[in-house]
Image (cartoon, rainbow, N blue to C red):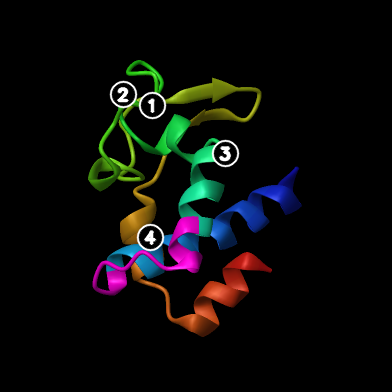
Amino acid sequence: MRLSMNIAGAVIAGWVSLVWAQPPAEDADIRHGRYLVQTSGCNDCHTPGYMQKDGKVPEAEWLVGDTLGWQGPWGTTYPANLRQLFQQLDEKAWLARVR
C-alpha cells in the first residue's frame, strides 16, 4: 500500500508540475496526468466537495487540500494541498520523495 501511495504521489507531482508550472497546453502528458488523477481517486480526498458533488468540481479547484479529516487506525489525517506541496520540490527532492 505504501509503495502504491508513493507511485500515486509521483504521478500527481508530475501532473501538478505540468499543469500549474507551465502555460496551459493540451498535450499528451497533461491528458495522461489528468486521467491518472481522476481514476486513482486523488480528488476524493484532496479536492473539497468532490465526492459530494459527484466529481462536478472545476479542474481549477482540484487538489487544493481540505479541512475534512479522515479517521482510521492510523489516527486522523488531513488532505494536503498537492499543488503547493509539489511546486515546492525541485527534481532531486521530488525523486527522493517518490522513492
In this rendering, the answer to whether 50 lies above or below 15 is above
Residue type indicated by callout 3: Thr
List the residue tagged with mark 1: 55
Q: Is residue 69 magenta?
A: no
Residue type indicated by callout 4: Leu
**Could you give the CA–CA distance between mark 3 and mark 1, rounded to whole angstroms?**
11 Å
Q: Nearer the viewer, mark 2 or mark 3?
A: 3
In this rendering, the answer to whether 73 lies above or below 88 is above
Question: Which residues are drawn in magenta?
Answer: 21-31
Instruction: Say which quarter of the image contains residue 74.
Output: top right
Q: Residues within 10 Å of mark 2 (few under 14, many from 20)?
A: some
The quadrant of the rendering that contains the N terminus is top right
Judged from the image, the secondary structure of the residue bearing numbered disc 2 is loop
List the residue tagged with mark 2: 49
Closer to the N terminus: mark 3 or mark 1? 3
Q: Looking at the rendered structure, which numbered label has been put on residue 85?
A: 4
User: Between 85 and 31, which is closer to the camera in this rendering?
Assistant: 31
Q: Nearer the viewer, mark 1 or mark 4?
A: 1
Judged from the image, the secondary structure of the residue bearing numbered disc 1 is loop
Q: Nearer the viewer, mark 2 or mark 1?
A: 1
